[in-house]
């Protein structure tokens, strides 16, 4: 595990008025004292703040922090993880292009590819990310490769260095969703990935109280994103959300360590339970992938046929039913219910997420309490043998 990045605790640069917490610049616009001053800004001779859809000082502080943590030159904040994913993709693709995406990616990213992008003439090929040779073989001729390691629901790992290196040599842009590992446990840019995306709504903010997204990458790529995504698509991060995410990130390393320890404890306990047929957690495999120094607390497990999924869910007391993850509270989503999601591109049906799979976000409660709640619910949901 990386040591605590000191940046998380205190910023390298003094803040206005030496404030110890980030000031919230709740302003849409910034004023100029003279014609010369505003003309300089418009001519690109000055980098003063103009309008918060472009840049805002509170958002800039978070962008600087995530860029330093991910080891990239720059970053940009968006109003949600999905806005960040759009920001990382739309400026780089055109009709006729092909994207290579890892199978079992985040469900709404999949739907973005299958609906909006496909309507604009961008086709996506899905590849099992565990099969590095298949990933590499799919790259020639693609415009962009979209990774998520581990994947959603199945928690499959990809060989990031191998894919990123081949992509770079072929001129294919590589993008990864790093929301699960966070820069505390995984820094994909160091392995050669071009753009790193975050749903800051999850671990980075960490308190289930806001939405946000970030894209980190080279200055050149972020400039391109600036021209099209931040200014023209406009799904920009708000100053108050940047403040909340910065506030959450002060404890990011501490929380990630707890999510990891509890997640592993709960996963191992479930693995020993006779009514659990599989546990999907990358930390249970013997081999630790290159570049992954720790594990998030989100994973999945499969209940045996003898356990009624509906009764199991309703028997939980501590763990609540709810989407999202990364906050202090433990949450589950039953795959059986998620399969019913409407829409032309339901990744659960298409990629066969098992109806007996339960996704569990292990929160910050004591691990023993989480295990006790799960075991009690399993016991009360067991079908009595006829
Ligand atoms: C939630 C999530 C997103 C989307 O983030 P939003 O802020 O909800 O738009 C993207 N990727 C992953 C892996 C997620 O879990």
Image (cartoon, helix red, strand yellow):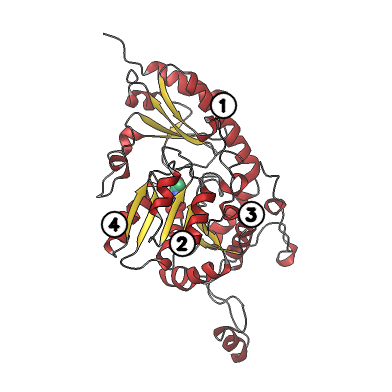
Residue at x-position 45% and y-position 50%: 147
Q: Is residue 165 visible?
A: yes
Q: Earlier in the sequence, mark 2 or mark 3?
A: 3
Q: Earlier in the sequence, mark 1 or mark 4?
A: 4
Which residue is denoted by mark 3 in the rendering?
A: 69
The label on residue 265 is 1
Tag in front: 2 or 3: 2
Tag in front: 2 or 4: 2
The label on residue 170 is 2
Q: Earlier in the sequence, mark 2 or mark 4?
A: 4
* Quarter in which the C terminus is drawn: top left
Task: Find residue 292 and report its horizontal and vertical position in percent.
Answer: 58, 42
Instruction: Tell me: residue 262, above or below residue 222.
Output: above
The label on residue 224 is none
Task: Find residue 168 and report its horizontal and vertical position in percent.
Answer: 50, 60
Instruction: Tell me: residue 63, above or below residue 305.
Output: below
**101 and 169: which one is in front?**
169
Q: Earlier in the sequence, mark 1 or mark 2?
A: 2
Which residue is denoted by mark 4 in the rendering?
A: 115
Q: Is the residue at mark 3 in contact range of ligand 1, meaning its CB lies under 8 Å from it?
A: no
**Position of 65 compared to 270: left or right?**
right
**Position of 304 compared to 290: left or right?**
left
| Callout 1 secondary element | helix
Q: Is the residue at mark 1 in contact range of ligand 1, meaning its CB lies under 8 Å from it?
A: no
Give me the C-alpha separation between circle 3 and circle 4: 33 Å
In this view, the residue farthest toward the bottom is 35
| Circles 1 and 2 in contact, beta carbons < 8 Å | no
Task: Find residue 280 and report its horizontal and vertical position in percent.
Answer: 45, 32
Give me the C-alpha separation between circle 2 and circle 3: 27 Å
Q: Residues within 10 Å of mark 3 (few under 14, many from 20)?
A: some
| Callout 3 secondary element | helix
**97 and 307: which one is in front?**
97
């Amino acid at each position: 595990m990386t040591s605590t990045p000191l940046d998380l605790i205190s910023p390298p640069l003094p803040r206005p008025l030496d404030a110890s917490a980030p000031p919230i610049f709740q302003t849409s616009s910034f004023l100029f004292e003279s014609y010369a001053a505003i003309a300089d800004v418009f001519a690109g001779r000055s980098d003063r703040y103009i309008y918060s859809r472009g840049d805002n000082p509170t958002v800039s502080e978070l962008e600087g922090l995530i860029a330093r943590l991910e080891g990239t030159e720059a970053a940009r904040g968006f109003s949600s993880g999905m806005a960040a994913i759009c920001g990382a993709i739309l400026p780089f693709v055109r009709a006729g292009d092909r994207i290579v995406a890892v199978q079992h990616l985040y469900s709404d990213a999949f739907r973005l590819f299958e609906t909006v992008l496909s309507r604009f003439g961008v086709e996506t090929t899905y590849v099992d990310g565990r099969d590095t040779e298949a990933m590499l073989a799919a790259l020639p001729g693609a415009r962009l490769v979209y990774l998520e390691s581990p994947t959603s629901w199945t928690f499959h790992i990809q060989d990031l260095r191998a894919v990123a290196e081949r992509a770079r040599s072929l001129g294919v842009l590589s993008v990864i969703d790093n929301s699960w590992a966070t820069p505390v446990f995984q820094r994909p840019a160091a392995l050669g990935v071009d753009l790193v995306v975050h749903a800051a709504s999850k671990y980075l903010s960490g308190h289930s109280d806001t939405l946000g997204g970030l894209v980190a990458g080279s200055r050149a790529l972020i400039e391109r994103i600036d021209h099209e995504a931040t200014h023209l698509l406009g799904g920009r991060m708000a100053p108050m959300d940047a403040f909340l995410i910065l506030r959450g990130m002060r404890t990011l390393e501490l929380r990630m360590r707890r999510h990891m320890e509890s997640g592993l404890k709960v996963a191992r306990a479930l693995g020993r339970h006779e009514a659990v047929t599989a546990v999907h957690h990358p930390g249970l495999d013997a081999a630790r992938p290159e570049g992954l120094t720790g594990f998030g607390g989100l994973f999945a497990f499969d209940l045996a046929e003898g356990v009624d999924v509906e009764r199991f869910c309703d028997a939980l007391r501590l763990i609540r039913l709810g989407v999202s993850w990364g906050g202090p509270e433990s949450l589950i989503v039953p795959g059986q219910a998620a399969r019913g999601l409407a829409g032309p591109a339901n990744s659960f049906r298409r990629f066969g997420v098992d109806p007996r799979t339960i996704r569990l976000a292990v929160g910050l409660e004591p691990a023993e309490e989480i295990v006790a709640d799960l075991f009690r619910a399993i016991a009360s949901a067991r079908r009595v043998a006829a």
